[in-house]
Image (spheres, grey):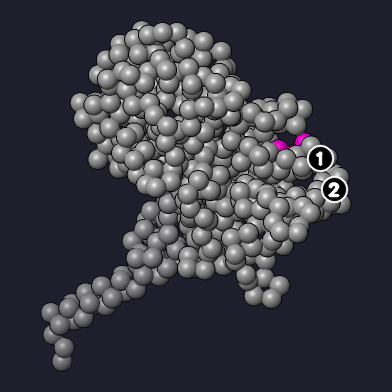
Amino acid sequence: MTSIPEKSAFISRSFACLFAVSILFLILSSSILFQFGDNSLVPRSIYKLIIVQTTRDYIKPVETSVPFVSLSCKESCSTPNPVKSAICDQTQALLKVFMYDLPPEFHFGLLGWKGARNQIWPDVSKPNRIPSYPGGLNLQHSMEYWLTLDLLSSISPNISRPCSAILVHNSTQADVIFVPFFSSLSYNRHSKIHGADKTTMDKILQEKLVKFLKGRDEWRRTGGKDHIIMAHHPNSMLLARKHLGGARFLLADFGRYNSQIANIDKDVVAPYKHVVRRLNARDSPSFEERPVLVYFQGAIYRKDGGMIRQKLYYLLKDEKDVHFTFGSFSSGGVRKVARGMSFSKFCLNIAGDTPSSNRLFDAIASQCVPVIISDDIELPFEDVLDYSKFSIFVRSSDAVKKGYLLKLLRKVRREKWTQMWERLKEIGKHFEYEHPSMSGDAVDMIWQMIHRKMSYVHDRVSKENRYEMSQKFLNV
């Protein structure tokens, strides 16, 4: 006969078992309910926090890219650090982009890439199969390469990137139409006549592109107003640009365009890719560790607006704490420039044949405070980045006054310079081209800029206020 204590123990164990099984079923049913019920009383984010976050293979929810600085934050808020994003959800993207399947001769074929039969694009999910962009000065205009890679990556299931732009396969569902022509590379490599040829390969490709676009329903539907064409090198698309002026161009500046073809209201200024190595913030020399006050190395004798370089050279060349010399990027020139900038407090960005150059972005990468002497320059992302917090603007007419520039820069105290130096370390990531792209890097910022242009909500900083803001910030 079973004793009372044994019965009690049996009942207790049964209740314990029943309770454990009930809890297990409750968790499983809750998981199914929360995971698949879009109208669940418990928000999906809470479900992930309770259930999913405890698993080893938890994938962070999609981080939607939005313009990274609100207008109210523009002057005082710091921007977030780049964070890897999960695979982009099409419904989360700022921009839906349709890309023409142009033959490889217009893009990766220019890099020597040859795919399998009828293969138009390389497999971007495998880094060892992605053709590399040529180095040297070619790199400064490689924006076309990074943007195209990013679009291809947007539909790759194993690549994590921001959700600013995503590729769609139906042009009627797209916000913009992307034209994947590596026009800068085409100009750099194929703009000269060889042998018995009567024309250049660059010209042939431009003619083919114009014919192709003019024959497309997508172009005729809007006159090209929703088309994105990359023409970063100032001499690229020289033939085609006059036929395709209705499109939105991605440019370095407007120095060689008339305002009817390209202007700040419709087009996007994209940063150069810097050619010097970006300094790690921890390794960046401080004020006392930068003995050179002013640094410039490059071509001195330029035409048109670049004449100011020659004038400044004769004003500054004999100053003891100024490095102002001619130099090129050949024969170790990049390393010399990188070292020179990293040991200088201020780096001059002076107008040359065009208003802009990659020198500004080399200075940012070196955390050398840029001094911008280029009256007609347009700057990337200026509607959300306050350049006066990390750069100094000087009018050309003031810069060539004897003693003016050095007097201005020598009045900048250590504390003020350090503020600008710290800001340079914060914003440097916005000028980095990467694959896969990162939240807030140059690729992500360009897509966001295109979105703002298309939405007519961009808030362009007035050029007339640049100089006053610089002076006010420096308290000089």
Q: Nearer the viewer, mark 2 or mark 1?
A: 1
Looking at the figure, which quarter contains the N terminus? bottom left
Q: Where is residue 82 shown, x and y percent of the image? A: 41, 44
Q: Where is residue 188 shown, x and y percent of the image? A: 61, 49
Most foreground residue, 43 or 301: 301
Badge number at residue 243: 1
Q: Dot 1, how many residues are within 10 Å of its Cα: few (below 14), some (14-19), or many (20+)?
A: some
Magenta stretch: includes residue 246: yes
- Labels 2 & 1 near each other (Cβ < 8 A): yes
Q: Where is residue 147 shown, x and y percent of the image? A: 58, 50
Q: Is residue 414 above or below residue 449?
A: above
Most foreground residue, 415 or 294: 294
Say left or right for 426 vs 397. Answer: left
Q: Residue at x 37, y 18 (%)?
A: 316
Q: Amino acid at mark 2?
A: Lys
Corner quadrant of residue 31: bottom left
Q: Mark 2 sits on what residue? A: 214
Q: Residue at x 76, y 57 (%)?
A: 197
Q: Is residue 89 above or below residue 461?
A: below
In three-dimensional space, the C-alpha distance between marks 2 and 1, rounded to whole angstroms, equals: 9 Å
Q: Amino acid at mark 1?
A: His
Most foreground residue, 148 or 154: 148
